Image (cartoon, grey):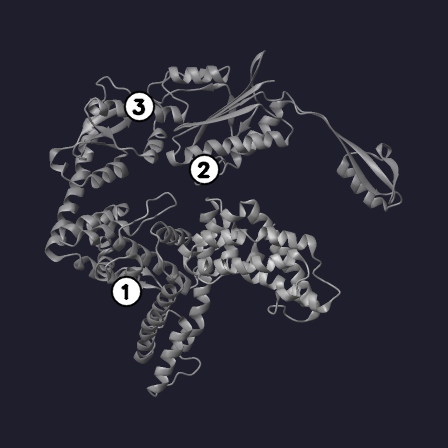
Amino acid sequence: MPDLLIELFSEEIPARMQGKAASDLQKLVTDGLVEAGLTYAGARAFSTPRRLTLALDGLLAQSPTLREERRGPKVGAPDKALEGFMRGAGVTRDQLEEREDKKGSFYYATVVTEGRPAAEIVAEVLEKTIRTFPWPKSMRWGSGTLRWVRPLHSILCILVDEAGAEVVPLDVDGIKAGQTTQGHRFMGGDPFEVTSFEDYETRLKRNFVVLSADERADAIWNDATNAAFALGLEVVEDKGLLREVAGLVEWPVVLMGDIDDEFLELPPEVLQTSMKEHQKFFSVRNPKTERIEKWITVSNIETADNGATILAGNQKVLAARLADAKFFWENDLRVAKREGLGAWTDRLSNVTFHRELGSQSARIDRIAKLARALAPMVGADADLAEQAARVAKADLSSEMVYEFPELQGLMGRYYAKAAGLPDEVANACEEHYSPLGPSDDVPSAPVSVAVSLADKLDTLTGFWAIDEKPTGSKDPYALRRAALGVIRLVLSNDARLHLDRFIDAQLVRHERHIQNGADDADLEALDSLVDEIADHGVFGAALRTILDRVKGEGAEAEEGTVLRTVGDKVPDLSTDLLAFFHDRLKVHLRDEGIRHDVIDACLAMEGGDDLHLLVSRAKALAAFLKTDDGENLVQGFKRANNILSQAEGKDGVEYSYGADVKFAEEDSEKALFAALDAAEAKISPAMQAEDYAAAMEAMASLRAPIDAFFEAVQVNSDNAIVRRNRLNLLSRIRTICSQVADMTKLEG
């Protein structure tokens, strides 16, 4: 069984594309070979800046011969139908057989597909792969039609067995496959032939090419950390940068340089970002002072002066970059100390957040009002929360963030401290963007939590108000991430808040902006509606209050006015957005082992907009269902509910009251009455106290009495009074269990 080696050698492939390109090459080739009947024992894919490589072990020497029976038209069918069948099967009339089956007599053909040599199949599959390769961006060059990420120079494609290496005959736009490759662009020798993957990898390394990206990354990290350790320093870990740099070099050479003294006092994040983004340098930190004092670059070549010339050139370029950063930093500090962050916030009135949602300044005003309302719910000072919200986005107008957008928030903290603002406000400037992803840290400082919640809720309600919701896999405004951020903020900080009222209020604020062309009385009424929602917590009651007030003042409030329009629109938007939160919550809790039907069962109860309450109930129910008592009780409940539902449908009445123990005939029946009384006495107060564990424990006590009841008692008795009493008893089971969750939503 031969081995296959493929190398596609080109000009430099962008580092960000290399990993996926290697995976795509492996998938496209292996899928194509298997589809053609060639299986293999193992596959490995590699990438360097100038080559994609695939090695397959244990490939079949040829595809197997296949025999397939095909049933054709009925005997006696029109000639054209028969001719079409023979043409598709590749057979003649005398090769057909007539066979009888249950549906009559049919023509059958035996189609034999002869096996083909591996080289022939590999050539077809590889040519198709090259011509249809899914590069994010590709180019044509010369007069050919082939598109590749960069000009493709050569194709190495050989099959290796005991007899030696065989070149697969292949020609793609004049590029013929061979068994020759070349090493490093500058340090490698002449092109050389290879006879196997082991020979290929070994000779590449002799010619200063490390084939494996992981091996290059490990070499870079080991050499960098050793060089830093020797000076009592440490390299700032950055896995993304390490992966990128490993894709920029074929022969990594680690070099360490100095940062000029005049730049050492810059914030470490500024130094690190500037060096990473512009130069692809690793930062080297002094663990005693936390200052960034040196940098590490990775060269692609060994030099006679041990990299001195390379370091000098890099040092010169870096000094210019850091001089710019120092200018931005010092200029921003002067503004922050002299004018305060308000100078930058004012500029944001000229910056559009979204065409339909207004400027950044208008958004800040909405966030500040919402942060103030949220503050008591998360234990924050309302004044500090509003102050933090009003300056949290100020650094977007700073020169440093304009140059390095990824520093937004972080620079806000520095500038807020320079402006003399409280630490809670400064920290909120940085932390309010978090959490940015499922693994990001969640803020815990109350002011930061209030501003972060307000920021994310404003984003979500705004895009809901203009009907820009995520669709399918598309989520250009990262609204799923924002919803998950709200969920994690609430759960991590044990925050108790009813999202519904805050969603309603913020939707009205957005509608006020959307309806900005309305007259002053309508806009004033919308402002009053927001205040009323805060007081009542119920949108409908708040709207009725404002409508009554408007009428009392002699103004018109008929159908079609702004107030009525907003009143019709907001409840539906609010309900839809809350459902979006619930969908995100299901995804979040799925990772914790809580089934979606458990959450649905809890969502059917009151308080679905209190995420903390909802999750506490769902976790208790999930734990209960993992016990034998829980699983069996659910089955007993469903049996009771099914019998009851069928009887109610048949009789046209609702059996919901009147169960009396004096009509009980069986001991198990009487025991169930007693068990339900005892459980209800415990479940109701436990649910009011939100002691869900106690409520579940009380429910578990019903498992045995319910099982015994169904084993001994026939519900549909011939005695009408007894039957009605037993159905009302089943209704008690349904009512008592439904205090905990809607058991009908549970699967199984």
Residue 264, percent from left and from top: 14, 36
Asked if disc 3 and disc 1 are in contact, CB closer than 8 Å, the reply is no
Asked if disc 2 and disc 3 are in contact, CB closer than 8 Å, the reply is no
Judged by depth in the image, the label closer to the viewer, 2 or 3, is 3
Q: Which residue is mark 1?
A: 369
Residue at 43 percent across and 65 percent down: it is: 574
Q: Which residue is mark 3?
A: 222
Mark 3 or 1, nearer chain start = 3
> In the shown orientation, is residue 49 left or right of residue 731?
left
Mark 2 or 3, nearer chain start = 2
Height in image: 33 above or below 324?
above
Judge by depth and name the residue closer to the eye, 628 or 278: 628
Mark 1 or 2, nearer chain start = 2
The residues tagged by marks 2 and 3 sit, at their Cα atoms, a distance apart of 39 Å
The residues tagged by marks 3 and 1 sit, at their Cα atoms, a distance apart of 51 Å
Task: Please rate how many residues cluster around mark 3, counting C-alpha atoms within 10 Å: few if below 14, some from 14 to 19, many from 20.
Answer: few
SS of the residue under disc 2: loop
Q: Which residue is mark 2?
A: 140
